[in-house]
Image: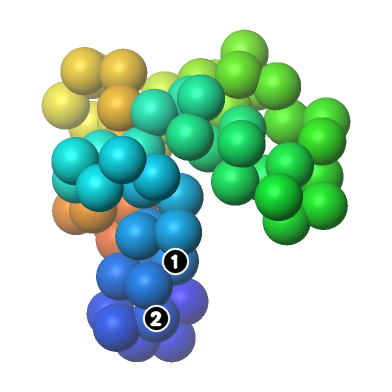
Amino acid sequence: MADIETAKQTFARYDADNDGFITAAEYSKAMAELGDPYVTETVAQALINKADTSKDGVLSFDEFWAAQNV
């Protein structure tokens, strides 16, 4: 992602309950809404785990931002 404002907007789209974290359920649902129904919660959790530096099973904005800038 080019800038932090775009990243914040994208993060907000995935963070459906607006609690500051993206769960596997939220990620999977957002992907389905974007046209990719094949991202199951299991797949979403695997993707989250790759960027989840705190190892709490969810993705914070800081983790999301860091993953976008690798």
Quarter of the view holding residue 53 = top left
Residue marked by disc 2: 6
Q: Residue 10 got which mark?
A: 1
Q: Which amino acid does label 1 sit on?
A: Thr
In the image, 58 versus 53, the foreground residue is: 58
- Residue type at the position of mark 2: Thr
Task: Give how far across and how far down residue 46 sits, in percent.
Answer: 54, 21
At 19% from the left and 41% from the top, the residue drawn is 19
Residues at badges 2 and 1 in contact (C-beta under 8 Å)? yes
- Are there few (<14), some (14-19), or many (20+) residues within 10 Å of tag 2? few
Is residue 34 rendered to the left or right of residue 3? Answer: right
Residue depicted at x 60% and y 46%: 30
Looking at the rendered image, the quarter that the C terminus falls into is bottom left
Of residue 58 and residue 13, the one placed in the foreground of this image is 13
Residue 20 versus residue 51 in the image, above or below: below
Residue 9 coordinates in the image, percent (x, y):
37, 72
- Classify residue 14 as left or right of residue 40: left
Residue depicted at x 70% and y 22%: 40
Residue 63 shows in the view? no
- Between residue 43 and residue 23, name the one nearer to us: 23
